[in-house]
Image: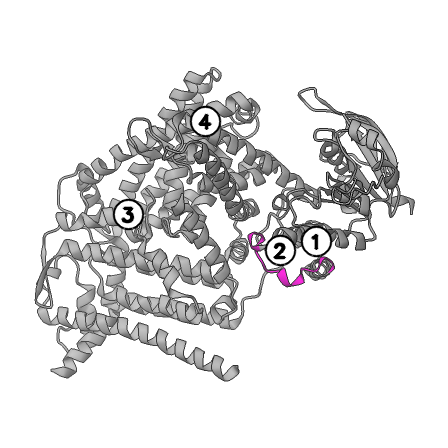
Amino acid sequence: MSHHKLEVKDLHYSYPDGHKAVKGMSFCIHHGESVGIIGANGAGKSTLLMLLMGVLFPSQGEVCVGDVHVTKKTLPMIRQSLGMVFQDPDDQLFMNTVYDDVAFGPRNYKLDEKEVEKRVLNALELVGILHLKDRAPFKLSGGEKRAAAIASVLSMQPDILIMDEPTAALDPKSRRKVMELLTSFKHTKVITSHDLDMIFEMCDRTIVIKNGEIAADGVTSEILVNAELMDACGLEIPLALQNCPVCGITKV
Amino acid sequence: MANIMNSLYNMRLLDDLSRQETVIHKLHPLIKLLTTVSYLTVVVSFGRYEIGGLLSLFLYPVMVFTLGELPVKPIFLRILLVSPFIIGIGILNPFFDHQIYLLGGIEISRGWVTFLAILIKSGLTVTAALLLIATTGMDRLAGALRMMKIPRIFVLQLLLTYRYISVLMEEVARTLRAYSLRAPRQKGVHRSAWGSLAGQLILRTFDRAQRIYEAMCLRGFTGEYHTGGFKEIRVWDLSYFIGWVFFFAVARMYNIPMLIGSLITGVIR
Amino acid sequence: MHMADALISPLVGGTMWVATAGVAAYSIKKIQSEMDEKKIPLMGVMGAFIFASQMINFTIPGTGSSGHIGGGLLLAILLGPYAGFLTIASVLTIQALFFADGGLLALGSNVFNMGFFSCFIAYPLIYKGFMGRGYTTKRIFFASILAAIIGLQMGAFGVVLETLFSGKTELPFGTFVLLMQPIHLAIGAVEGLVTAAVVTYIWNARPEILEGAASGRALGNVSIKKVVAGLIAIALITGVGLSWFASSNPDGLEWAMIKTAGTAELEAPDGLHQQLSDLQTKTAFLPDYSFKTPEAETELSAGEEEETWPAISGGTSTSGLVGGGLTLALAVLVGVGIGLLKRRKYRTNS
């Protein structure tokens, strides 16, 4: 299904103050792939996500979703097929009940209220928080907020899920739950994170970014174990792969 | 600061209460809003010396309290915190009006009667507003506002303010904690930090607004706010409204306590 | 300085509601025509910030007391007058609903007192006047203080007038003004100082935020002509309201005049109340003063205005006391009764 592919061609972006955040990135993500994007702070991950979503527009190069270029005109269409989960759920859950929040997207696309309800209940069911539908966001735990934020994107029925730090600020159990949830989705997934163990578990492919350029792009199990590459990009190999401090077994 | 955190707690309490499912909670939000406004108008229309007629209006809050199964204590505590402004204005009355009024054989100055009338009115109006929100909740009230054709922009903005009060209060509280830990002997924020402390909070708020705006746009926001469908107004809702308005009108036109009182005293004689 | 429901009359409250709704509708139209939908979340979150900022105590040097961010002026500077006004309106709405500050009927007055004067008078005429020649620290300082003081003085005077026109308290005009204005001079000075400090910081850190509002490109453009036109419209509305007040009660306006001069005793029957009691006189069919006739008592209570009150017989006041006590008891009894019934229903259900 080629219409679900996400392609980036020679992407450049500079901020108004002249800072070049993205310098010539190119890659293509195919249907059903699960791709991790990693890099040190300030490497350009967030800018890249903003460019993918059409919040920012590239100064040079282009982003294509399926066969459609991301431009001001195509945005409504693009945003239906791309769903983005923000790092801070408080930014994403801006309504006063979980239900209204999950319904915000479908209502904006002027679906009739029955269809909206169906989609909302379906999305809440999928992430397992149907019982919280009338809660206020400030009444939710960190994990529940994350689930609600994911549901608010699922109700738009996107083909591609883009997630910024989906496991940030979660306790270990909630983190595990979110990871299981994300693994259960058949969507194409793009995940940026510093949680390299999560990337190692969930993504088959990893793109490493350094100073606005792609430093590596390939199979996760090969890239994350490359200590030299990781070190050069301000990262380190996942904890699960590091030498065990107790028994001293060398894993890599 | 403790006082403000208290307000936050109070706000959350009201929000929780509004999610109950009683007869009153199930009434149409628009009906409850209109009933409240009629009630307030009638309460406020009483003159400076008319305490008698006001008393029959206690029936409304009592009914809503019981039918809505609301806890009396926390809401009552809130009412006791009458704004100092009202007390300040009211307490001066006895000094300006010394006309003597004979009440059951006791001579009192008319100024005290005015003060009492202001206090009763303040209690009733404050209660009515709190009861409205405790039985309706902000989101359903916003729906009622939309039904009254209040512009979408304002309603959405009102909802956003309500939503982010708790988020921003926590943010400000964190900043103040960090400040006070490094400035142990200061009561408030020193003048040298006024601009930077509040200014940085504002800049962070601007950044947050930008992220929220992006989150909204990504889900198809184009400046229009779409509420779902409206609940229908049932016959029961209408009769609730008409019933109360009728009672308010009667209570306004006839001094019910005086009627009861003269009946009783008349019978005794 | 929230105006409270308990102090306002329906007429004054209604008039101020109309005025505020007019200004709000105009502001909304302005924002919509500028197509600046980005402002909407910003207005919402800044409203929440104004709430949260009440937690910050700004210590005033040398006094031991502390001040807070007021809101109106700062919002106008950061968001422009239209968005600033709407933001203040939503902040005050939530305060009226959840914190019982002010009240729903007094909401119109409060938004007008705290929003209109700072956003549409102090900001465009004073603050922008200073800033027309560009931002400097000194100008920010003087403009903020002056604008804050003038905005608050007008707001406080608004409270005084609204309270007096409502006639729910007996405070003479002169005393009231002497109470309100000096206090708000101090509050205004502090608010001005804090606003100046904050604006200076933001001007240094992110000047584009301020220029957007001040250069009149996005939303900041207020033409003085429109402000004046708005004021005239409001004066007209108030005038119509007042003349109605006056015609329904000829003594009313005269009273207001005397009061404004600050001389005579306070002797004002409420206009609307007068009408209602007229209606009552018409509906009461036995205008007779005897003990056992309920309708007569009604008539008496209706007539218990200033003239008749001191002459009210002891019998009437006793009935009043007895009846008042009984009514309250009855109300509580109804509540307790319903509560008991409900509990029993629960028990049988469970």
Looking at this view, name the residue that lies furthest to the front. Answer: A247
Q: Which residue is mark 3?
A: B84
Q: Is residue A72 magenta?
A: no
Q: Position of residue A235 (x, y in %)?
A: 76, 32
Q: Chain of mark 2?
A: A
Occupied quadrant, residue A117: bottom right
Q: Which residue is mark 2?
A: A98
Mark 2 near mark 1, Cβ–Cβ under 8 Å? yes
Q: Does dot 2 land on a helix, a strand or a loop?
A: helix
Identified by mark 2, the residue type is Val
Evaluate whether label 2 is on the same chain as label 4: no
Q: Mark 1 or mark 2, which is nearer the start of the sequence? A: 2
Would residue C280 be seen by someone viewing this image from the given angle? Answer: yes
The quadrant of the rendering that contains the N terminus of chain C is: top left
Residue B195: numbered disc:
4
For mark 3, does the 10 Å Cα neighbourhood hold few (<14), some (14 to 19), or many (20 or more) residues? Answer: few
Q: Is residue A131 magenta?
A: yes
Q: Chain of mark 3?
A: B
Q: Position of residue C205 (x, y in %)?
A: 54, 23
Q: Which residues are magenta?
A: A126-139
Q: CA distance from mark 2 to mark 4?
A: 37 Å
Image check: B194 left or right of B108?
right
Looking at this view, name the residue that lies furthest to the right. Answer: A1
Q: Which residue is mark 1?
A: A151
Q: CA distance from mark 2 to mark 1?
A: 9 Å
Mark 2 near mark 4, Cβ–Cβ under 8 Å? no
Q: Which residue is at 15% across, 78% downward?
A: B265
Would residue B37 be seen by someone viewing this image from the given angle? Answer: no
Identified by mark 1, the residue type is Ala
